[in-house]
Amino acid sequence: MKLFEMKKNKRLAFWIYVPFLLFILTYCTRGYVPKPAGYPRIIFPEHGYQTYNAKCNFSFRYPVYAKVVLDSSNTAEPCFLDMKFPQFNATIHLTYKPVSSFKSLYAMSEDARTFAYKHTVKAEDIIDSFFTRPKNHVSGIFYDIEGNTASSLQFYATDSANNYLRAALYFNTHPNKDSLAPVIHFIHADMDTMLRSLRWR
């Protein structure tokens, strides 16, 4: 009789605990959602500007959290500058050249267009916007390059007679539009300020 009761208790325990165990196992895995990739939070400084008076024929306002230095590459000319953003691991390369003729201006403008559109392979879109500041004798084209490209923002500016300046933003990191988007948006405002404050001398 005791043996029969023990077997009965074991069967009862089996039918109680096994379904409970299966329920726990399936419940724990049923609603699993993979955690999306996260990016570190970026603390942006307040926008503040100072004037850079180049030894060349131009001046502009640039951010207080950036540093302007002479381009040290082998191909650099005297009026080639680098505006470095150490906090963002980014650099705006500035290329200034005097305009000697309409033909040279056209060639430099086409070079700027070529440099922007060479990113077409990886770009999702390239938005080119013509701008003009008649009071300062400044006009040109701003290129907003969207996608995982090496350069996201570029422009060239000229007075159509004597001066030409080209700028291109590059990050010293693997391009990732999702993680870099806030920084690109932030620096876009700085490049707008540069253009609004650009003066020829």
Image (cartoon, helix red, strand yellow):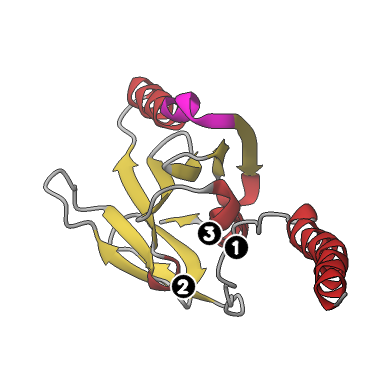
The answer to which of marks 1 and 3 sits earlier in the sequence is 1
- Mark 2 is surrounded, within 10 Å at the Cα level, by few (under 14), some (14 to 19) or many (20 or more) other residues, namely some
Residue type at mark 3 is Met
Relative image position of residue 168 (x, y in whole percent): 42, 46
- Residue linked to disc 1: 38
Three-letter code for the amino acid on which mark 1 is drawn: Gly
Mark 1 neighbour class, 10 Å CA radius: few under 14, some 14 to 19, many 20 or more: few
Q: Which residues are magenta?
A: 117-124
- The residue that mark 3 highlights is 194
Q: Nearer the viewer, mark 1 or mark 3?
A: 1
Residue beneath label 2, please? 51
Specify whether 88 is left or right of 133: left
3D distance between C-alphas at marks 2 and 1: 37 Å
| Magenta span main SS | helix
Label 3, label 2: how far apart the Cα atoms are: 10 Å
State yes or no: discs 2 and 1 in contact (Cβ < 8 Å). Answer: no
Lower position in the chain sequence, tag 3 or tag 2? 2
| Residue at left offset 33%, top offset 46% | 95
Q: Is residue 185 above or below residue 3?
A: above
Who's the residue at 15% across and 43% down the image?
A: 75
Residue 121 shown left or right of residue 125 in the figure? left
Task: Give the image quarter of residue 161.
Answer: top left
- Outermost residue toward the front in this view: 1
Q: Position of residue 170 (x, y in %)?
A: 40, 50
